[in-house]
Amino acid sequence: MKFAAQPNAGNGIGKIMKSKIAAGAGAVAIAVASLPGTAFAVDPVRESYLSLYGGLAIPQETDIDYDDGTISATGTLEFDNGFRVGAAAGYNWAGPRFEIEVGYNSFEASKLKDVSINGSALTGSATGAIDFSLLTVFGNVLYEIATDSPFTPYVGVGLGVGFLEASPEGAARTVFGTGGDDTIFAYQGIVGGKMQLSEGTSAFVDYRYLGTSEAKMGDFSGSISTHNINAGFMFSFSPTSSR
């Protein structure tokens, strides 16, 4: 008895199954890509923006000089932590960006140590409160490092002007009088990162070192430097792709 060769039905079924699987995978990929919130535009863009932030200010101890014409003294002020708030408006050229920033620091000096009066060193330290406020206006130049992801690190520097005011309270008035204010040069270094939350909105965290030239406030003088850790939001307007 002879048997006629039959067509291989398994091969035909396999081809049909493979084509159906490929079509299904393509449909799933298209559906996932089209879901809202599953992807962000990560191409660098040119855009104007506004940012708002707040954070912790950590002032560094500073050397001060006092001279009222009769008494000449030097010492070192120690500070308690304070806060910083601010806002900036700028433009991003798909990497480099420039902004004008207005910020406000508030903190308090609570201890004076290493005191020398008319050349004679005093032992111990003096306590008292001096309230400091620092309003700054900066022109900042920053650079964003493209990562092809929603997260973008950045670095920058800023130069500007500071308006510093010192207000001694209680016993500190006997040493520093009524205090005073001065307009001074200010500068800062910036390093941080932002995370895109949605089109036109990002959250950011950064560190800023802020320093000033010497200020003369009443009969005493000194400079200010602070470490600032900030968090805030950036709102972008009229973005245009750079590609």
Image: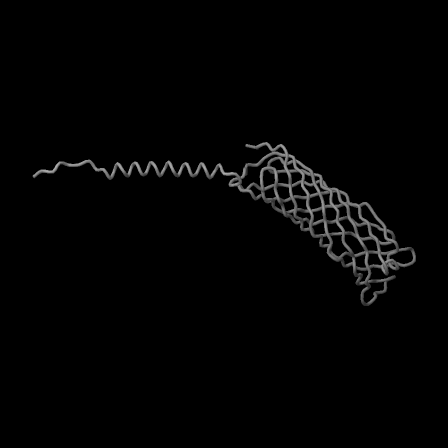
Count every numbered label the image shows and give the total.
Answer: 0
- Of residues 67 and 60, the one nearer the viewer is 60
Question: Measured from the top left, where is residue 165 in percent x and y?
Answer: 82, 49
Q: Residue at x 9, y 38 (%)?
A: 2
Residue farthest to the right? 70
Position of 28 with respect to 193 (left or right) is left
Picture quarter containing residue 77?
bottom right
Residue farthest to the bottom? 123
Question: Measured from the top left, where is residue 91 in percent x and y?
Answer: 66, 35
Quadrant occupied by the C terminus:
top right
Q: Compared with residue 102, is residue 126 higher up or lower down, i.e. above or below?
A: below
Question: Measured from the top left, where is residue 201 in percent x and y?
Answer: 61, 40
Question: Measured from the top left, where is residue 193 in percent x and y?
Answer: 61, 46
Position of 226 with respect to 12 (left or right) is right
- Of residues 198 and 225, the one nearer the viewer is 198
Quadrant occupied by the N terminus:
top left
Q: How is the image coloured?
A: one colour
Q: Residue at x 39, y 39 (%)?
A: 25
